[in-house]
Structures are given as C-alpha cells and as structure tokens.
Image (cartoon, grey):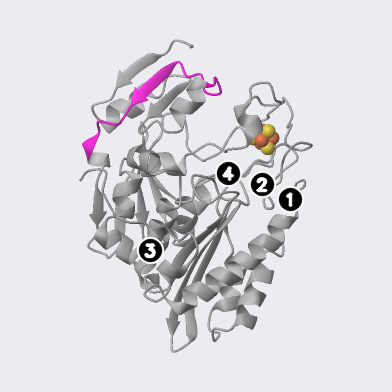
Amino acid sequence: MKRFEYIRATSVAEATSAAMEQNAVFLAGGTNLVDLMKVGVSRPDRVIDISGLAELARVEFLPDGGVRIGALVLNTDLAYHPQFSRDYPSVAEALLSAASGQLRNAATAGGNILQKTRCSYFFDLASACNKRQPGAGCDARDGENHGLAIFGWSRSCIATHPSDFAVPMVALDAVVEIDGISGHREVLLDEFYTLPGDCPERETVLQPGELVVAIRLPPESKTFAQHSRYLKLRDRTSFAFALVSVSASLVVEDGMIRDARIALGGVALKPWRAREAETRLKGQVCSDTLFREAAEVALADARPSGNNAAKIELSRRLVVRALRVVEAGNADQPRSLPGSVFAEQPKVSANG
Ligand code: SF4
C-alpha cells in the first residue's frame, strides 16, 4: 500500500487548513474512500480524519421550519430519526434503499453525496478511464454499459452517480454548506455536481481544501410530507446501486396538484431533476394520462450512451409508477410495495 500521512482533525478549521496540501483527502465513515484506497484508485498523500468532529454529527430542526443535516450524521440515524422520516419520507426511503445495514451504520450524509461512481472500469486499474486518469480514454463506451448514463453524458465519460440519498435531496432543493480557508459558502445541491464534459475527473464545485459541513432542506420541503416517495429499480433486490430511481413528491389538494418535484437517479453523473415534468403536473388534476404525459416530458431529452436504450423506457415507466404511488399518499401505500424498505423491521439506530 502507498504510504500516506494521517491527521486526526480536532476542528473544521484545522481540517480545512490541513486539506490545502496537494493530494489530501477527508476521511469520515470510510465506506467509499477506504475501498478506493485498497484497490489503488485513490492514492492520497494525506488523509485527514474528520470523524471526531461532533459538531458535524447533529440533525437540527431550524426555527424557519427547515432542517440542517450535519455532514457526519450517519445514514441509519437520519433514516430512522422519527421527526425527519415523518417530514421527509422520500429521503428516509432513499437512505434505507442503499447499501447494507452495516454500511448505513458507518456511512455519513456528507460522504453519501460525495460518493464516486460505481462504473466498473473506474475501479479496474487495467481499464482506460478518463475519470481516473485524464486523457486515458473510456473503456465503458464499448464495454458493459447497460447501467450507465442516459442524460448529461459526454464522449469522455458516460458514468452515473451512485447516491440514492442525493436524489430526493435534489428534488427538495437541498443546499450544501461548505467551509474552507476562505470562509463559508452555500450551493444548491443541484448545482453542486458538475457534468463530465471534457473534464470527467472533476465531479463537484468544491475547491481545494473545502469541506462539506452540512446539507440543509428549506422549509417548503416539508409541504410534500404526505405525498413523497423514492422508488428504486436495481439488478438485484438488495445491496445494489440503482439502475434507475425516481424521487417524486406532490402537494395534492382535492385531487389537484399544487406543487410537484421529480428527480431521477442512476441516469446521469448527478441526480437528474425533471423540472419541465414538474411544470406539466402543477395545477392539473391527478390522472394516469397526466402522469404518462409528465413521464414523456421527463425523458424527452434522454439518449442512450451505449447498450442502454432500455433505461429510457424503464425510467419512463418508473416515473408513472412513482406518481401513482405518491398520489395515493404515504399513509396508505408504503408497506404494500414489493421490496419496499418501509417493510423493514425492526428500526434500530446505530446509536441505540
Ligand atoms: Fe471512466 Fe467514466 Fe468511462 Fe467509466 S464511463 S470508464 S468512469 S471515463
């Protein structure tokens, strides 16, 4: 294994200062980074362990009605937080649909949104990969690519982002709080990610040394609580990344859609917000015809990046299904869906 310097940070300021060194990385739960280091995909010179920063491990319900999720809040604790899961069921459902119980007990909110792609060529040092080695080429283009991108891809990279959590968070207009040596700034999660273009090695707007300290949901996110779900299709039922996922949220009054949010996962190098489909739904009466029209609009710009045209129809059908389920409301439906994570029992927190 390559030798690296290990620093255990005692404050955010210490962590961000230490991270100004070239080829430094932050370590939190380690569920992604350690795997990448083991196979030699990530070869940092300095590892800054931030896992002891207790101030980043809190869920705070804000006076304005929003919620602030510290970057070190564990996936399990957030998913089973009674108030959080009641107010944001699609986020809880996305968290519980991801990985395994053991991983969710160690993985953090900040690490979740910063996961690396699961493109198999990225993990294989014998393959050409522009993301791992700029200019090397992309073996996925002519390889096994049935699960790769249908939106926002480029000739340089056709990978997808693996996070489930980030999909409803983008749909609900989450904001990322970032600290660095230049101070604090905030970015919409939807604008936090960059598309591959000619620089697939760059994945977010983070500058050298910057640390994600929290992710915030605005007050209006809660208005979707009664009609908000996350549906995920994958090659096997558990412990697999999404082939396609849909986060759908509606505000429904007397059958009329007052507000709508849709984002797709597993289709691009970022969660893909379907804003035009949302516009198509707003002010309309719920119906299957309307849901099909919205799904058509949501997938209108999709194009296969390889042998994955089937993902477009799969996505279209999943949008329709998600909207049907969401219209019915959370109270009536969750446990009846095949493979629903809401069927899981018991709900045990990693912290007891
Ligand atoms: Fe690498 Fe992207 Fe090509 Fe996968 S799709 S091999 S991550 S460049």
Foreground mark, 4 or 1, reads 1
Q: Which residue is mark 1?
A: 308
The answer to whether 175 is drawn above or below residue 293 in the figure is above
Determine the residue positioned at 59% across, 64% down.
Answer: 274
Label 4, label 1: how far apart the Cα atoms are: 22 Å
Residue 100: in magenta span? no
The answer to whether any part of residue 200 appears in the image is no
Residue 73 shows in the view: yes
Identify the residue under disc 4: 194
Please identify the residue farthest to the right as the structure is shown.
Answer: 142
Q: Label 3 to label 1, Cα distance in Å?
A: 30 Å
Amino acid at dot 4 = Thr
- What secondary structure is found at the residue carrying circle 2? loop
The residue at 29%/55% (across/down) is 346
Q: Are marks 4 and 1 in contact (CB under 8 Å)?
A: no
Q: Is residue 306 above or below residue 50?
A: below
- Which of the two discs, 4 and 2, sits closer to the camera? 2
Q: Give the quadrant of residue 292.
A: bottom right
| Residue 112, label in figure | none
- The quarter of the image that holds ligand 1 is top right
First-in-chain label (3 vs 2): 3
Q: Which residues are magenta?
A: 39-54
